[in-house]
Amino acid sequence: MPRSRPSRPPPAIAWFCTALALALAHPAHAQQTEQNVATESDDAFGRSVGAERSGLYSTSDVRGFNPTEAGNVRIDGLYYDVVNFLPGRIVKSQSVRVGTAALRYAFPAPTGVIDYELWVPGDEATLSIEQDTGNPLVNGPAMLIDFKVPVVDEKLSFMGSVFFRNVTARPEGGDQVFASYSPMLRFRPTEDIDLRVFNATFYTLDREARATYLPAGNQLPARVPRGKFLGLDWTEFDDKTVVNGGSAHVRLSNSLRLDAGLYRSSDSIDHAYGDFLLGVTADGQVADRLVIASDGNHDASLSGEVRLTREWTAGAFAHRLIASLRGRKRDRRFGGSARLLLGPGPGNVFTNEGWERPAYTTLPKNLDHVRQLVPGLSYSAIWRGRGSLDASISKNDYEKRVEFANHDRVEAVTRDKSLLWNVSVSVNLTRGLSVYGGMSRGVEDAAIAPENAINNAEAPPAIRTRQKELGLRYAVTPSLTLLAGVFEISKPYFNLDRDRFYRQLGTVTNKGVEISLTGKILPGLNLVGGVLLLDPKISGEAVASGLIGQRPVGQVKRHMVANLDWRSGGGDGSLSIDMAFENFSGRTANPSNTLEAPGYSTVNIGARQRFELGGVKMVLRPQITNLFNAYGWQVSSNGGFTYSRKRTAFMSLVADF
């Protein structure tokens, strides 16, 4: 039967013409040419600018957990229920709020929060154009145009971006196309009212499922050649992610402010596939190939938050009180997948020939409905020169309802009306030295069942999480800061049992130490350095009975990063050189804990040459990732192996008109 594909991106010619007209009609000031993740990071807990990132953590990994899957995401501080990701060039940067970075942050989550900062149009016209040959994620040329323009004096302004990338060499081989557009309108009728509406739409086109390797017994899989496409041509799919949103920021008085955000996020995939090679041996033999095929996948969420904030001072104390209402309504189609066992084919993993597409039929979808409302109060106080206090309390009203396509199964309904809270205290011991401690209790989403599970795509009900932490902050110099802390996080542990059914197998507790050293070492030389030492353990009946080991699959015990950026002229010159080092320890690779994927290290190098041409500010940026071509295995929580990216060189040119 013919495939139903997500709608293709609309023509962008009008956008290009508009942007070009703006460049000719309005003088602009540098924006994109000044971006540098190494110099913009205040800590080593994780920050991303464009495709570049620094720090220990990312949107998918904070202290051994995935905050995005857990639903701990914010847009400019306001609650947002992410479906896939926040797409498009509308995102200026993203930061991980954890440890000291979560102090003074209202309603933090036990496993960290990902906070997106959006670009907003201002009072000046700007135009940035970027052409590159690839980025740290993919190879293939791209064209990016970002522009901002005031429409009516300082009251109404508009921004937009268009992005297109023809990926000629995915890290796992093969090609695909990325395209996005992201407009935003900002209205400021008075100095006290700021209203914004935006759209962010992202297309992934003509992409095949990546091959994932599940090892035989206790041996590592063979090293397959990187960059060679070893997936199956017929697993091609298209994906469309859309986020429509708006926010209002209103100053009601000198001490009272109203902030609100409402976002609708959706993700549609015509045909979805998971591609697994089973029983892969050290010499590359394969026992079987499993493809999980489904169609008509759709996930949509309406979410947002309203906040009323009062701030006031009394003597040496600065107070802040926030009344908040967060909520979401999420509907998802899942299940009905076909499990296609294709046999051993040619018998090895070094070729993708010999596995033909079989005829198959998918089943009707199940429906997953989540409704959640969370009213809460947050209080923060700063005692000038002495310390601070942060506390919040919320009431979680959660309902999850699953309607099964098989009418013989009874509709499943779960509810949670728990009390959520957090409290943290920081104390200044001496000038430049402070200590902090905190405890929190939260509710978050558990990860969805992986593709190779019998009940794949099934989402468990919300789970309760707990966290305790203690740390210090020390100003080594006025421009160099040391952060060190210990933490303990516990939550229910979900993974595959011996029958590959995804269910709760116990409780996982992650204990760890994290260290961050960031700032200016010498004039023009900046450092973002971090170390994570992690001790993750599972407890419960599954461990006691020997069903699984006590170490969760896919987690590391050590992670180290160091980003160095040197700029000539003591930080004011036109040339800068940067280097990024990253080290991972070995990873637990199977549920019985009898196999470990070895650790590996990577080094990236790059440079920026700034110059002007005809009054236009430009930056030429060459980069090489994985300089020494280290081969490393990444292991997912379901035990699937995928290799790290090979050495890649690329270059970009950014112009701010």
Image (cartoon, rainbow, N blue to C red):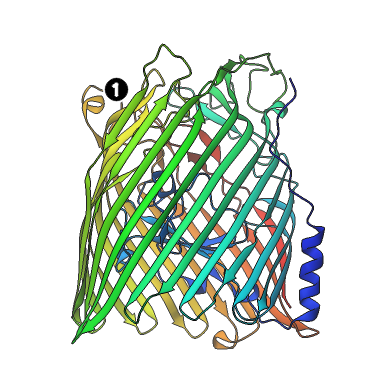
- Look at label 1 and name its amino acid: Leu
Residue indicated by mark 1: 547
**Residue 301: percent from left, percent from top:** 48, 43
Q: Is the residue 467 above or below the residue 193 in the image?
A: above
Task: Please identify the quadrant where the C terminus is shown.
Answer: bottom right
**Marker count (numbered):** 1
Task: For mark 1, give the secondary structure.
Answer: loop
**Residue 352: percent from left, percent from top:** 69, 26
**Residue at coordinates 57% horizontally, 51% vertically from top-left?**
243
Q: Residues within 10 Å of mark 1 (few under 14, many from 20)?
A: some
For the question of whether residue 384 can be seen, the reply is no
Seen as rendered, the residue at the extreme top is 408
Where residue 164 sits, quadrant-wise, is bottom right
Who is closer to the viewer here, 259 or 593? 259
Task: Please identify the quadrant where the N terminus is shown.
Answer: top right
**Residue at coordinates 34% horizontally, 60% vertically from top-left?**
98
Who is closer to the viewer here, 477 or 241? 241
* Left or right of 460 on screen, residue 199: right
Q: Is the residue 267 above or below the residue 495 in the image?
A: below
**Residue 428: percent from left, percent from top:** 20, 78
Who is closer to the viewer here, 577 or 369? 369
**Residue at coordinates 65% horizontally, 44% vertically from top-left?**
171
Who is closer to the viewer here, 602 or 652? 652
